[in-house]
Amino acid sequence: MNLNYSLTEIANWMDAKVIGDSNKVVKQVSFDSRSPLVNKFTLFFALKGTKSHGIDYVADFLKSGGELIVVENEIKELKATQLVVSNTLVALQVLAIHHRKKFNIPVIGITGSNGKTTVKEWLFHTLKFDFNIVRSPKSYNSQIGVPMSVLEMTDEHTLAIFEAGISEVGEMKKLAAIIQPTIGVYTGIGDAHQTGFKSLKEKEAEKRMLFEKVEVLFSPESVENADKIEIPFILQAAILNAQLVKITAQYLGLNTTQIDRALLTLPTISMRMEKMEGVNGNILINDAYTFDERGLEIGLKTLLLNTQNRSRVLVLAPDLQYEVQKSLNEIIKASDLDTLVWIHPQAYPFPSKFKCIHIKSVEDFIQRQLTFKDSIILFSGSRSQQLERSIPLYQLRKHITRLEIDLSAIRHNLTEYRKKLAKKSMILAMVKAQSYGSGSVEMGKFLSAEKIDALGVAYADEGVLLRKAGITLPILVMNPEEGAFDNMIDYHLEPSIYSLNILDQFLNRLILKNIKNYPIHLKIDTGMHRLGFVNEDFNELIATLNAQPEVYVKGVLSHLATADDASEIAFTNQQIATFQEATKTIEKGIGYSFIKHIANSAAAINNPNAQFDMVRVGIGLFGLMDNVHAEFEQSLSFKTQISQIKIIKIGDSVGYGRRFRADKKTTIAVIPVGYADGLFRGLSNGKWQVKIGDQFAPIVGSICMDMCMVDVTNVICNEGDEVMIFGWDQSIYEMANALQTIPYEIISSISSRVHRVYVD
Ligand SMILES: *Cc1c(COP(=O)(O)O)cnc(C)c1O
């Protein structure tokens, strides 16, 4: 960041009261005291987060050499200049708005449900030789990320590309004022599926507010009749994104040949850093796909946050053309490294306190295989250097075929739910069926640590496992079976009682054990017509409850049949109304109140009137509720490695039944995943493609029980390379579509022999 504003000027814009010496200059802003770049010109905004408050970091900030802070309440006796404002986030945004107004260059604003970051990075890839571009780093597209990105604009830039993401009504207006785009790019609202038209429309209208003042807008409609293009990807979404890139580049004056050439080499966009376990107790952070100073700053921040007692190592392989700036040294210096591995033909030009190992090329780095121990190693490099090729040398290879569960994504999704629950409803996480395939004990422990209010399982055995693992949260059992009652009572699991018959049996057991006041939930059938009490049962139910001191009603629940389908909103509302009636009747009948809960993942988001006292979320925690709510992150990836590669001749066939026959010389890779692992046989012979590096390889022939074969004729790969079957950029929705099923079935079918690996 390279600002140059007087503090008084900034205070004026923000309508701030200045306390302390106002004769200061601001060169950059920060909202994170752990940011490596803090000095006396840094203006620190104490923002309120969901979990933390910037105020708590003021001391850190001052210790790192900062002197200027923006706060909402004056802090007494502080040796710093304070700007007191009524809202620190608004103040940051106001500063960005003023900064933006100084520039008269084309500014591309991108929004839409999917592919914002991809389109942004692809535009950069296509336009970088013709413009000096400033763009949002990674997927910085929020109420904080957007102003931070806009503040990066300087006089030297000739084009800006910013993305905007929203999660609530009203947010886009603010982002539009900050970005002030002149060119709009809309990536669309995604595949609507069964999700609702009305709310979808609303969402779309909100998103389109970014474009109110643009001179031109490119959207999926603009490319409906576009010519075919050639890109290294085959997914429909990728083609659409590339077409948007193409017309935008044309509008900016690039010629078709130039653009088409750039499209042929579009990179895969890795939006986040991968963290993994290395050999020798190392932790590796892979950020080897793009390189710029802002990105490096973010990478180093991740390194600092994860250091614990490890030595800090940065492996840096910038582009050969990269001209080393002093600012690079400042960023690196601030992160207190132990070792820098500098991969570049020229030596690192600055004197430094840390150990500096100079290696001339990534090839040499791979040849030399340096040894690190108990270190945290950040691999950062420009795409052209392909530094990621060196990572397998340092990676701990425990599991070949594995389901990776990204705990930080689940944490993020949980936070999204907490934000969206209007009332302070409690959250019960459904962890039935091995927690949707992700492992019930590990998930139970993780969710306990994240302070979830309760857990839900299908069968008592699943609850017993959780208890044996030391989990003390309330646990609701949806299908209490008579044979498991003793276990349920001994392990204090709460049954969902759904019939007079089950209630009787359960009471008998409690009477035998001489137990009083045992918590139960009553399940009402409000239209799903699965388990549950119906109206006709209520009189007898209430009479029984009133006569028996063995139980008390802790909760009353029901389940919605169409919460994920807005066209059935009337039915959902009918179910909710029936539920309300039923709870009223029961409340009146038994004379006390209880926890009411009916919403699943979809209803918790889509139907505020379904939230009641508690919601029960399952699929939403994995970011797989629908592909409209882009604010949720997909948290499961199914991965393996190539076992063998072979070349076959024209006419040769592959696999059982010879269902694939080569019509040219073909390279085949064998991967150790079959239908017994949960890779459905219906995906055979081209119905699905796996991803190797950033390229796609279609499945050829029939999927076997333990293995399958993929066509890698056009993929650069080696035995042992990682293969992604599905994951955050290989959508489970598309796999579900190909199989005419839903993500639930796919993830709960990953068999138990597939290792579960938890990453955070
Ligand atoms: C599985 C289940 C849920 C969670 O459903 P999602 O669609 O995964 O959120 C909620 N309630 C009951 C009764 C369930 O069986």
Image (cartoon, rainbow, N blue to C red):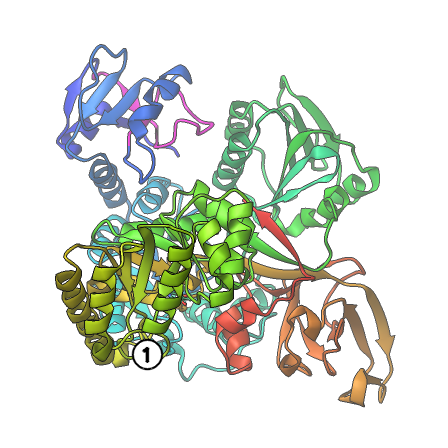
Does residue 531 appear anywhere in the picture? yes
Q: Is residue 634 left or right of residue 579?
A: right
Q: Residue 18, how many percent across, how many down? A: 16, 20
Q: Residue 81, how many percent across, how many down? A: 24, 17
Q: In which quadrant of this rendering is ligand 1 seen?
A: bottom left
Does residue 238 appear anywhere in the picture? no
Looking at the rendered structure, the secondary structure element under dot 1 is loop
Q: Residue 521, how many percent across, how many down? A: 32, 60
Looking at the image, is 705 positioned above or below residue 374? below
Q: Is residue 743 left or right of residue 192?
A: right
Q: Start and end of the magenta stretch? A: 22-46
**Residue 708 within the segment the image draws in magenta:** no
Q: Is residue 702 left or right of residue 48?
A: right
* Within-10-Å neighbours for mark 1: few <14, some 14–19, many 20+: some
Q: Quadrant of residue 332?
A: top right
Q: Nearer the viewer, residue 747 or 295?
A: 747
**Residue 28 within the segment the image draws in magenta:** yes
Quarter of the figure with the C terminus: top right
The residue under the point 22% across, 10% down is 77
Q: Main secondary structure of the magenta part?
A: loop
Q: Which residue is mark 1?
A: 528
What kind of residue is marked 1? Met
The residue under the point 38% across, 31% down is 32
The residue under the point 25% across, 77% down is 534
Q: Quadrant of residue 202?
A: bottom left
Q: Is residue 756 left or right of residue 169?
A: right
The residue under the point 20% across, 13% down is 76
Q: Residue 234, how many percent across, how many down? A: 58, 75
Q: Nearer the viewer, residue 370 or 307?
A: 307
Q: Nearer the viewer, residue 129 or 493?
A: 493
Number of marks in the rendered image: 1
